Amino acid sequence: MHGATPMSHEQPPRMPETRPSSAKAAFTLVELLAVIAIIGTLVGLLLPAVQAAREAARRSSCMNNLRQLSQGCQNYVDATQTFPPGGGRVRSSNTLYFKKPPYAFDGTRSCWVHYVFPYLEMTAEYNWMVNKGGPWNAVQDSSACPAKVPVALFGCPTDPNVGKNKTYAKSGGGSQSPPDWPLGNGWHGNYLACAASTVFSSSSPDPDYGAINGVCYGVSQTKIKDIGDGLSKTALLSETVLVPDTDTRSDFRGRYWNAWDPGATWFSTLYPPNSTNPDNLDGNSSMVNTVYAPGSATGSNYVMSARSRHTGGASVAFCDGAVTFIVDGVDPLVYRAYGSRNRGTDSE
């Protein structure tokens, strides 16, 4: 058409092309440090919770061990009408050896543990010991015998020294050094029987450890009717901690198979759990003094306290089979009464 404006053939302006950048996205140093800090904080919060959960499981396992041992003692009561004796022989006034008791084997250097073996599905170990003539003879067997192999039931999983079976002193006297230590005094255990709420003996020592007021002591034959305070209020078993022997000294605590002084397998409620007062046995016994287990072997006020590597207390099994965790801050008078079989804390 004449006079019409011709159509423009101009194209719209083109936008400049953008090419993908060859550089990759990455954390800056500040961002990386921030992530590391966050992860570190989360680990710091989580790790104590994991450790606490693991310790709760270990403490539960320990308490279960005490329940089973307590049940073994209950089965012993059913069979014999008495609780197991704390030791198989009593002291003589002029010797540290013991008089033979009316038991199935020579009770020399035995303790409560050996009497409950048959009631803990450990009949084979018991028969082996009897055939050897008792624990004193059995522990001197140099072969891979039951006295050398720790039993998990008698060990607290929280104790880093659980299953201790390397000892400095030879069972027959004298000393020895690695690698012969395992031929020493047999495996040690973490559990003790309650002998008293007092010292085991005083400045005028009772040669037979017989005048003490707990359930298991000397050649005790405590009957249910003798426990006037009630089974649920009278302690039967608790814990101790194991201390490694050194190159020059042995620690008697928990030494079952060579209970030269059976007090090393007993405890008293004289002091609360984990007391700073040292465990003390006579001069023929031996202690390695440590922060977590103070110990001595001097004087004549012999006593052993309940101890554990659990935080804040130790577990106690009562004569009725119940197991309770007793805190270190327990009322001392209440706790002391638990160790007496009759009339509270009064000695008998």
Image (cartoon, rainbow, N blue to C red):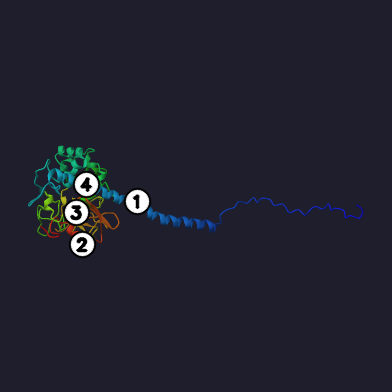
Q: Residue furthest right?
A: 2
Q: CA distance from mark 1 to mark 2?
A: 30 Å
Compare marks 4 and 2 and give the one earlier in the sequence: 4
In the rendered image, which quarter is residue 4 located in?
bottom right
Pick the front one: 56 or 138: 56
Q: CA distance from mark 1 to mark 3?
A: 29 Å
Q: Which residue is mark 4?
A: 69
Image point 14% across, 43% down: which residue?
79
How many residues crowd mark 1 within 10 Å: few (<14), some (14–19), many (20+)? few
Q: CA distance from mark 4 to mark 3?
A: 16 Å
Q: Amino acid at mark 2?
A: Pro
Q: Amino acid at mark 4?
A: Leu
Q: Which residue is mark 1?
A: 54
- Image coordinates of residue 9 in percent, x first then y, are 83, 52
Numbered disc 3: secondary structure: helix
Q: Amino acid at mark 3?
A: Ser
Q: CA distance from mark 1 to mark 4?
A: 23 Å
Image point 41% across, 54% down: which residue?
46
Q: Amino acid at mark 1?
A: Arg
Compare marks 1 and 4 and give the one earlier in the sequence: 1
Numbered disc 1: secondary structure: helix
Q: CA distance from mark 3 to mark 2?
A: 18 Å
| Residue 127 in sight here | yes
Residue 332, label in figure:
2
Q: Relative to 142, is 93 on the left or the right?
A: left
Compare marks 4 and 3 and give the one earlier in the sequence: 4
- Image coordinates of residue 165 in percent, x first then y, are 25, 45
How many residues crowd mark 4 within 10 Å: few (<14), some (14–19), many (20+)? many
